[in-house]
Amino acid sequence: MTLRPIRTEKDYQEALQAASYFFDHEPEPGTAEGDEFDILVTLIESYEARRHPIGPPDPIEAIKFRMEQAGLTAKDLIPSIGQRNRVYEILNGRRELTIPMIRNLHRNLGIPVESLIGA
């Protein structure tokens, strides 16, 4: 394969197809094929970052995701958010997160601040 910049969706699809071979037959790092694979993945990542950026998650979805990951219930959020009714207001989108809540959720549950601030 001749490596070249990915400028169009067609180029992108061709690069994905070429990379799929390497995922099934991963080359040794430091070999010519390994270098080709590294460059191809870098080109794909660059194109995706420009054309298909992924924004930050919705703050409530970030909290729910962490709850699911850690097997937490609404009761477990009380130290970070406040009384149980406040927790449910937050989880149901009826109330916004405050700065102290964001800090507590980050500190207590390890949720990235960027995810809690939202877009």
Image (cartoon, rainbow, N blue to C red):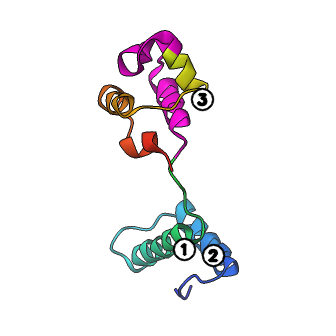
The part of the chain drawn in magenta is 57-85
Q: Residues within 10 Å of mark 1 (few under 14, many from 20)?
A: some
Disc 2 marks which amino acid?
Tyr
* Element marked by disc 3: loop
Q: Is residue 108 above or below residue 78?
A: below
Q: Quadrant of the N terminus?
A: bottom right
Mark carried by residue 12? 2
Whichever of callouts 3 and 1 sits on the residue coming sooner in the sequence is 1
Q: Quadrant of residue 107?
A: top left
Q: Quadrant of residue 34?
A: bottom left
* Element marked by disc 1: helix
Residue 12 seen anywhere in this rendered image of the structure: yes
Foreground mark, 1 or 2, reads 1
Q: How many marks?
A: 3
Dominant secondary structure (helix, strand or loop) of the stretch shown in magenta? helix
Q: Residues within 10 Å of mark 2 (few under 14, many from 20)?
A: some
**Coordinates of residue 56 in the picture (x, y in percent):** 50, 50
Decide which of 101, 20 is in the foreground and name it. Answer: 101
Disc 1 marks which amino acid?
Tyr
| Residue that appears at 39% across and 35% down | 111
| Residue that appears at 51% across and 67% down | 49
Decide which of 81, 38 is in the foreground and name it. Answer: 81
Q: Quote the CA–CA distance across marks 2 and 3.
A: 38 Å
Decide which of 59, 13 is in the foreground and name it. Answer: 59
Disc 3 marks which amino acid?
Gly
Disc 1 and disc 2 in contact, CB within 8 angstroms: yes
Decide which of 28, 51 is in the foreground and name it. Answer: 51
Q: Which residue is mark 1?
A: 47
Q: Residues within 10 Å of mark 3 (few under 14, many from 20)?
A: few
Q: Which residue is mark 3?
A: 93
